[in-house]
Image (cartoon, rainbow, N blue to C red):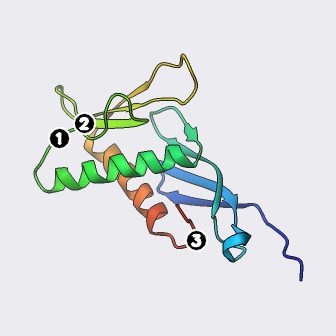
Amino acid sequence: MKQTLTYQPHSFGTHACRLRVEGLPDVSSNQANGALGIITGWSLDWLGHPQLEGRREHLQALIATVLPYARNLLSGVSRPMGEESDAVSIGPDPQGGHHMALRSSQPNTPPLELHLDDAELADLVRVLDQCRLDPRVQL
């Protein structure tokens, strides 16, 4: 029986921060039609900040950097995560809050520098956690 691939967008978030992940099921892994095994793109709409978007590896880098940073903060350890050569880095801002840098994979593109307060970081952590824990999204 021939299986028809259906484009699948999934959204996570709140009013202030919404992550949309798009893709297709990976039929070579026998994924169900509602799964996202092949991530074709994602976007993050975030009040007060420019829209972020990218490919699978950018989302993975965001999750791999922001979530450990937040865990460290909750443990009372305020230290930066990610290097200047990494796609994403985040750390405490000397003026308060958090400084996040997102580096494009496109040549000659300067990094996007964002200043986040605690509430914005919490919103970001919430949507990344929702995405990471959703069994339909195979990162």
Label total for image: 3
Left or right: 134 as drawn, with respect to 95: right
Tell me, yes or no, whether the two marked residues, 1 and 2, touch with CB atoms within 8 Å: yes
Please state which amino acid type lies under the numbered disc 3.
Answer: Arg
Q: Which residue is mark 3?
A: 136
Secondary structure under badge 1?
loop
Q: Residue furthest right?
A: 1
How crowded pointer 3 is (Cα within 10 Å; few <14, some 14-19, many 20+) is rated as: some
Q: CA distance from mark 3 to mark 2?
A: 30 Å
Q: What is the residue that sits farthest to the left in this orientation?
A: 76
Label 1 environment density (alpha carbons within 10 Å; few <14, some 14–19, many ≥20):
few
Three-letter amino acid code at disc 1? Arg
Q: Position of residue 64 (x, y in %)?
A: 37, 51
Mark 1 highlights which residue? 79
* Residue where numbered disc 2 is placed: 91
Front-most of 94 and 117? Answer: 94
